[in-house]
Image (cartoon, rainbow, N blue to C red):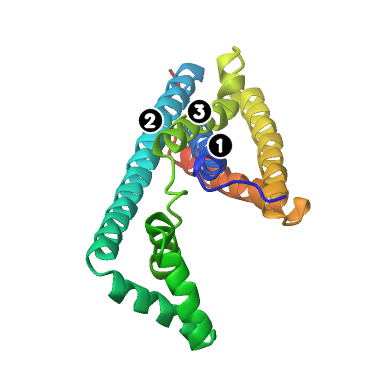
Amino acid sequence: MHRDVRGGGLRAAIFGISDGLVSNVSLVLGTAGAHPGAGVVRLAGLAGLFGGSFSMAAGEYVSMRAQQEAYQRELEVERTELRERPEFERRELERIYMDRGISQDLAASLAKAFMANPELALDTHAREELGIDPHALGKPLQSGLASFLTFAVGAFLPLIPFLGGTSGTKAIIASVIITAIAALGVGSTLSFFTRRSMLFSAVRSLAICAIAGAITFGIGTAIGVASS
């Protein structure tokens, strides 16, 4: 059975939690590497969580909405052409089928049958001519909400040790362990949808988080700040 991934929510959720993990573990470890005190790390992590969540949600909503509106406009143009130039559209559909190797007689028969029903004609032209599925134009609100929630979850995980009163090296190690486990979980979950190797997906997700966190931690350590 195929999964319905057309609405955009699944894609947004996966990218959201992955981005939340990578961006906030980088921010948290980069700040912690400078040894500014636990309060500063908490503030930076919370700012990254909320700022990133709203940014992701807004960006996903706007991009999906723009795509949806562009598709709707193309469908409206096609609907007008079908109403005003039906014979031209029938021949156009016939040519599409012939270009795909269908005989002229069969192509003409198919085009005539599809053009007999206005809604079926629009659906067929949208798919064959425009490459658009009229019933899967995306769900901007769903995608935006999924991005917000999943980014927030991903961004919250590296911050947990610093919210519990732990500080210093212990908090950094705990943050790294929590993030590593989460990254492996995200990668493993992704493999169920992509049908890629679970090990490959998990290691790839872990490697991305590890590289980003290590680089920012190194930068924070190199720059440093006066301890409060």
Q: Amino acid at mark 3?
A: Leu
Classify 10 Å Cα crowding around label 3: few (below 14), some (14-19), many (20 and above).
many
Q: Position of residue 52 (x, y in %)?
A: 41, 33
Q: CA distance from mark 3 to mark 2?
A: 10 Å
Compare residues 177 and 127 and report the one nearer the observer: 127
Q: Residue at x 56, y 28 (%)?
A: 153
Secondary structure of the residue carrying numbered label 1: helix
Q: Would residue 51 be visible to someone looking at this image?
A: yes
Q: Give the residue pinned by disc 1.
A: 17
Q: CA distance from mark 1 to mark 2?
A: 13 Å
Quarter location, residue 174: top right
Q: Position of residue 65 (x, y in %)?
A: 34, 43
Q: CA distance from mark 1 to mark 3?
A: 8 Å
Q: Residue at x 42, y 35 (%)?
A: 144
Q: Would residue 225 be visible to someone looking at this image?
A: no
Q: Amino acid at mark 1?
A: Ile
Mark closer to the chain start, 3 or 2:
2
Classify 10 Å Cα crowding around label 1: few (below 14), some (14-19), many (20 and above).
many
Q: Amino acid at mark 2?
A: Phe
Compare residues 114 and 153 and report the one nearer the observer: 114
Mark closer to the chain start, 1 or 2:
1
Please, is residue 20 above or below residue 198 in the view?
above
Disc ID at residue 54: 2
Q: Position of residue 175 (x, y in %)?
A: 63, 29
Q: Give the residue pinned by disc 3.
A: 149
